[in-house]
Image (tube, helix red, strand yellow):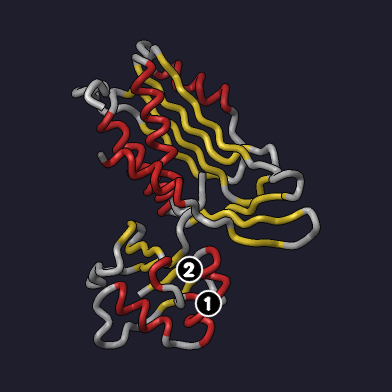
Amino acid sequence: MTDTPKPHQDIPPPVDVRIQSGDFDVAAEIERLRRSHPNIGAVVTFTGLCRDEGGRLAALELEHYPGMAEAEITRIAREACARWPLDGLTAIHRHGRIEPGGNIVLVVAASRHRRAAFEAAEFLMDYLKTRAPFWKKEHLKDGSSGTWVDARDSDTRDADRWKA
Amino acid sequence: MQLRYFAWVRERVGHDAETVDLPGGVATVADLLDWLASRDESYASAFADREIIRVALDQEHAEHDAPLAGVREAAFFPPMTGG
């Protein structure tokens, strides 16, 4: 990735990390970043949703480690700011019970140009999946509750590719 | 030292937190895992597969060979599945 844009050398961009049980509003979060900086040319958002797993899932229960969840995502976000020229980076992760179709996680990356915004959003998600202390438990429609979701090897590989 | 447990580790040990006095000879995360697994059947079940257990010391990820000196809070949990 020799053509990866370099980070700004001046003031570090604002990092906004929130861990909450309530929902978030994607449009409002984009607007918040857009208004915070006059020279943003690109905004990339990623929204992670709760699947219904072919109709069998009633809800996911997301457990988290209060304090560390925010600290760890903040560490990842700061690392992203050190790698790419960002003008703002927002990450919101929900916890508690979330039903199919509901929002789980939001990443908003803002930059002057698109490549930095795309790459930073993807980097943040890849590291968040394997390092942010959250665990999903499935509650099924047949009333059985459930099994803890297994971590995927592919998520570890996705995170590892940024180490090169 | 304050110990915290999450997800299926929490379910298997039967509680989410406790305060313990570490016995002599427990110097690293691996020592602590060995000691916890020896406490009773619940702990043995939670820590049977030592390799899969992830650890945080004072809310930062740590390896199993990390020393415990000066640590106030150790947390044990399965691989993370957020996002």
Q: Is residue A26 visible?
A: yes
Kindly identify the amino acid type of the residue bearing the numbered disc 2.
Tyr
- Element carrying mark 2: strand
Q: Check whether the beta carbons of the residues at disc 1 and disc 2 lie within 8 A of each other.
A: yes
Q: Quadrant of the C terminus of chain A?
A: top left
Q: In the drawing, does residue B37 fall left or right of residue A22?
A: left
Crowding near pointer 1: few (<14 within 10 Å), some, many (20+)?
many
**Chain under callout 2:** B
Instruction: Name the residue rendered at 38%, 17% in the picture.
Output: A114
Coordinates of residue A147 in the picture (x, y in percent): 64, 61
Instruction: Name the residue rendered at 34%, 14% in the picture.
Output: A112
Image quadrant in which you'd find residue A103: top right
Kindly identify the amino acid type of the residue bearing the numbered disc 1.
Val
- Nearest the viewer among A64 and A11 is A64
The disc at residue B5 is: 2
Residue at mark 1 to residue at mark 2: CA–CA distance? 8 Å
- Nearest the viewer among A153 and A51 is A153
Q: In the drawing, does residue A63 fall left or right of residue B37?
A: right
Q: Are marks 1 and 2 on the same chain?
A: yes
Looking at the image, residue B55 lies above or below residue B28: above
- Element carrying mark 1: helix
Looking at the image, residue B70 lies above or below residue A56: below
Looking at the image, residue A87 lies above or below residue B31: above
Residue found farthest to the right: A142
Instruction: Name the residue rendered at 33%, 44% in the picture.
Output: A160
Residue wearing tag 1? B13
Q: Quadrant of the N terminus of chain A?
A: top left
Looking at the image, residue A27 lies above or below residue B52: above
